[in-house]
Image (spheres, grey):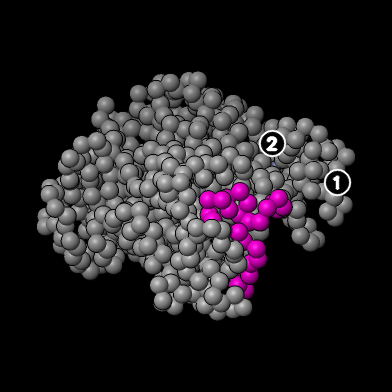
Amino acid sequence: MKELHFGVDYYPEHWERERWDRDALLMQEMGIQMVRMAEFSWHKLEPREGSYDFGWLDEAIALLGKYGIYTIVGTPTAAPPAWMINKHPEILPIDREGRVRGFGGRHHDCQSNPVYREYIRKLVTKMAQHYGENPYVIGWQPDNELGNSHQELCTCASCRSRFQDWLQKKYGTAEELNRAWGTSFWSQEYNDFSEVYAPRLTVTGENPSAMLDWKRFCSDLIVDFTREQTEIIRKYAKNQFITHNYMGFADKVDYYKLGELLDFVSHDQYPGGFYLPRTPHEENHVLAATLDVVRSYKNQPFWIMEQQSGITGWEIMGRAPEPGQLSAWAMQSIAHGADAVVFFRWRTCAMGTEQYWHGILPHSGNPGRRYRELQDFIQEVDPLMDYMHGSMPRPEVGIVFSFEQEYAFRIQPHHKDLSYTGQVQKYYRALYEKNIPVDFVSEEGDFKKYKILLAPLQYLMSPELEEKYMDYVRQGGHLLLTMRTGVKDRNNFCMTERELPGRLSEVAGIEVLEYDCLRNAEVEVLFHGRKFLANIWSDLMRLLPGTKVLVAYASEFYAGEPCITAHPYGDGICYYVGTEPGEALMEALVDEILSRAEVNSILPPVQGVECMFRENDRERFLFVINHSGQEKCYEAPQGYQMLKGVQAGCLGAYETQILKIGKS
Ligand code: GAL
Ligand code: ZN
């Protein structure tokens, strides 16, 4: 079978049966090769308890199949039907304020509820038996955007008791739990696991160790919820894949762990943002970082399961994508490692919450500008995708990304403007703007692949991770560590044995003796004789022998003291950044690190133009994407062949060129 590259999210159940043939024909004419269906249609599949009706879905799958279009089946467990909720209201989730969240949206479910789990097992078993060998069904998506809408949910009796079991398994005895959570503070000791609560809104403050375990538990619950479905599906669907639609940096579930259940990861990419007037999603570096982090979750090419195909918005709408912009966004997904792109959605829905989240077709169902643009796009790009099959970006720079650090900073952000993912993206941005491709890498990942490894905010530390960082530098790596590294152990206790950053002082060549949280203030610093600004935080440190000062503070009571340092260690260098560099300082610092590690831009940067590459053993594919509505010029490299585009170096509005470069 040919590799499939393009699809749409399709909801035939929202339209009259007479329309389906026309939809299939229009899809076929456009080059659509697959659809995802059914991920919210529990009631249609089981209208009454125990009475299943798969007829409509069978018919849709068969009809599309006749047009050469394959199906990814979604399990509808993000939308339990009214009959079930009425019979078992305990399935409804309870939030941190103790409020029951009602029926009428989606994800109104408690993922630990045993009754709900039983309904799921029955339905998913039926579906897997029914579709497991259907020749037109190629794969599965359990649930939808797991973790979405479960923020702050669920604290019901069932979740509380599962949390207690989870803790018992982890700690064994109540004494051990008390020690790990430091419960002697404010008289929070437990005599027995059965006394532990799921965290409800408190009168004042929370226990950071308990909250960290709660977040871990919630993530594990989602993985377990998913595993139940993947095991059933795998039993009956031996030749069909299982994937799931992730949401980039969303943190409710540890996506690395969830990925272990999947054949490959998918992601939903909405550059236009989510029904808010302006979100950071509109910034190109955030879009690029999001795609790169998704690639890192399994460290392999991924799919886009929902790619924006029109105006986004529920109650409030975003801007209309300009001519060419939808294609540029889809190209960006491919450049960063997507092997397939499924557009959300086929036709704009006439009813329900998402009436204004626009599809390829407008409400009228008549093909218009978006249809024609994406049709041309697919016709042109599909053969190129076949050609580039098996290629992956292979960056020389890695940025460590960890859900545990994210959780710990959510619990204690330190400063109103500090966020872990925000900080990671600031480092990413400096590299992005210089056309330096980046991989994200988990704490368990392979650091040695990278000439440069940036590890911002390594707040929770373990002896193994310390050793891994030290070893990386010893063997020649260029490592960047920052403020708030090595502050806590994995129980979220402050380290007390040594000055910060603990054992990593040896590799960083500094000891942090004091710090200053820059509340409503910036600090001036000096780098190569030039003044810059830094924010959020100042570490005040003592240098160990051999450490060089790169940047010094130039204001506050610590003017003249070191702010950013470099320390040769083994065959490598460790940089320590005691602050959050402002944009200009970040740029200068990154330049310095890149030049010392001899990492070069893939092309000289041009404002609004993104460069990325994928490669296999023979060839390198350079993507140059114009994200602007104006023509742009760039300096084409030597010895290329045009794979897509006419005149290398000259980009029309929203145009992408792909240059093929042989590898020597
Ligand atoms: C995604 C979700 C879709 C749809 C879309 C537009 O987050 O997976 O089901 O809701 O957003 O709102
Ligand atoms: Zn619950």
Q: Earlier in the sequence, mark 1 or mark 2?
A: 2
Residue at disc 2, secondary structure? loop
Query: Which quarter of the rendered picture does the N terminus lie within?
Result: top left
Q: Which residue is mark 1?
A: 189
Cβ of mark 1 under 8 A from ligand 2: no
Residue 314 in view in this figure: no
* Residue 387 spot, x, y in % from top left: 20, 37
> Closest to the observer: 138 or 252?
252
Residue drawn at (17%, 46%) of the image: 660
* Residue 443 spot, x, y in % from top left: 52, 43
Task: Give the numbered dot on residue 202.
Answer: none
Query: Which quarter of the rendered picture does the C terminus lie within?
Result: top left
Q: Is residue 496 magenta?
A: yes
Q: Which residues are magenta?
A: 494-523
Say what amino acid the circle numbered 1 marks: Glu
> Closest to the observer: 69 or 474?
474
Res. 81 image quadrant: top right
Q: Is residue 605 left or right of residue 564?
A: left
Around disc 2, counting alpha carbons within 10 Å, would you say few (fewer than 14), some (14 to 19), or many (20 or more)? some
Q: CA distance from mark 1 to mark 2?
A: 28 Å
Residue drawn at (73%, 48%) of the image: 210
Residue 591 in view in this figure: yes
Res. 591 image quadrant: bottom left
Q: Nearer the viewer, mark 1 or mark 2?
A: 1
Q: Is residue 170 magenta?
A: no
Task: Give the numbered dot on residue 113.
Answer: 2
